[in-house]
Image: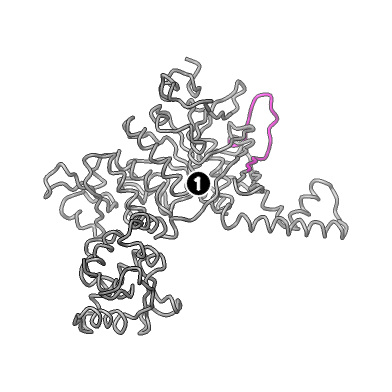
Amino acid sequence: MDKISDAQEILKELGLPKAQQNKICALTFLALCGIKPDDTWQNISSTSLTLSKGIMDFVNDKYGQDYKPNTRESFRKQAINPFLDHRIIDLNPDDPNLSPQSSKTHYAIKPLIVETLKSFGTTNWNDALENFKKYQFEENIEETSIIQNIKIGNFKSIYNMEIELGRFNVFIGANGSGKSNILEALAMIGASKDKALDLDGLISRGVRIAKPTLTLSSFLGKPTKKNISIEIKFSDSESVVSSSFQSSDDRDIYAKWKDQSDEYFNTKGFLNFFKETSGKKEFSNELLEELENLESYYSKKNITFSNKHLKIIADFLIYNLSTQALRGLKTDSHKIPLGINGEGLDLLLNNLNRNERLQLDKCKIFFDWLEDLKFDKDDSLKYQGYKLGKSGSILYFSDKFMLKKNNILSAENANEGILHVLFYLALFISNKTPNFFAIDNIETALNPKLCRALVKELANLSETNNKQAIITTHNPAILDGLNLNDDSQRLFEVYRTDEGMTRVRRIKFKKDLSDKPMKLSEMWTKGLLGGIPNNF
């Protein structure tokens, strides 16, 4: 096989579209790799080249071509720009501040490509390709932290509760047991850490707003407390992220909540705290010095959290899907990239990178009729009668069982199940979605067998893409997708005590379930796992 054919084959294996497997792209690739006709791929090197004097001169000189200067735009549009988009080459690596319009603009093959291609034609090629796909997009391999422990006090039906989370967590429980209250407590501390502890900030995260007297716990025979307390501990840190909330007016639904813990991260806050608790008006120099030391300590702790832990909490959202939003008929939530009701699905799918799209494509198995996804960026299909025009979604589907000339369905007309599934897959796949989130009532619009397969896939994707999720459900089929032998996948019963307080119990088994005569779904419906009403 000659080098041009080699290059075309490599570009195909690297996942570039067919349009980028032509002769110009292959020659551009060879020039950037420094590969001459008689070289082996082990001779690959990364040298910065300009377009005209570097790449085109190499192609004409080494491969006997005769491309004229007026063809440079063909090289740029067909090869250079797509290579940049697919992270094959770097732009101006020798001078990152150089303008892309500069005559000195240059390009170089990425080091990852160099290492990958050294295995071309060897028995290690497939392994090298897999490694390339894993590290091609740096944002897909960002390490994140896992929330290990959560303590919630005095929030709605939660008087005092603690839970040890895994990576993929499923909550079951009777209606009104407090599952959503747990999620809302997390959304409240998230809003605080995002400096958005107002009504809009809470609502946009999925919190149901009630006046403070109903948000604070209220139980017969128990004293009423004024503060909501939440503590979160991560698996990679001994420190705790905490909040203590108090409202400005307990009886006003529009009252503002204040996170008092923020006040204690500076000397003035400490002084105010000690004045309130000790009654003292003046303090010694020794105490002031000690307070400054404490401020320094908390400042350092805050820095530890600011880049990773606080962002994970601040990004937390509760997703509760609406088919109308998924169809592009409602845009109530303005969260980016995905709204809490399903807004923005089409744009996120259209902007998945190659690695993410490959993960999504593997899931076409869930819908045997699906041929492909299409995105009508110009909205031209609307004028051809494919939708009424009420929907703002640019997402379309092609049905492989229909005539090719008449097999396009808009999101406005497609079945709701595929919209829900695509949303969940995008949520777990994209590097632009939160690292920690919740899904309330995941089973909506889904066939029971699909529920089981979907949960199994989402659990795998959470591990692959460093996501942590809490899922609530009332559908027993969801449980059959869990692998409780994997400690990162956890099942919890949420219930209320005789006093009405929300509690959480992890459901564990001493041995695997292979010898059990019943599935988890059957155990639940028969009452063996709890999480069902007991009063009828």
Q: Provide the residue designation for mark 1.
A: 436
Q: Name the colour scheme.
A: one colour
Residue 130, compared with residue 75, is above or below; it is above
Secondary structure category for the residue under label 1: strand
Front one among 225 and 167: 167
Front one among 352 and 313: 352
Residue 396, position in %: x, y? 24, 50
Total count of labels: 1
Residue name at image x 33 percent, y 53 percent? 357
Chain part drawn in magenta: 215-231
Residue 37, position in %: x, y? 25, 74
In the drawing, does residue 488 fall left or right of residue 479?
A: right
Find residue 41 and report its image quarter: bottom left
Magenta: main secondary structure equals: loop
Quarter of the rendering occupied by the N terminus: bottom left
Q: Mark 1 Cα within 10 Å, few/some/many (few <14, many 20+)?
A: many
Q: Does the magenta stretch include residue 322?
A: no
The amino acid sitting under disc 1 is Phe
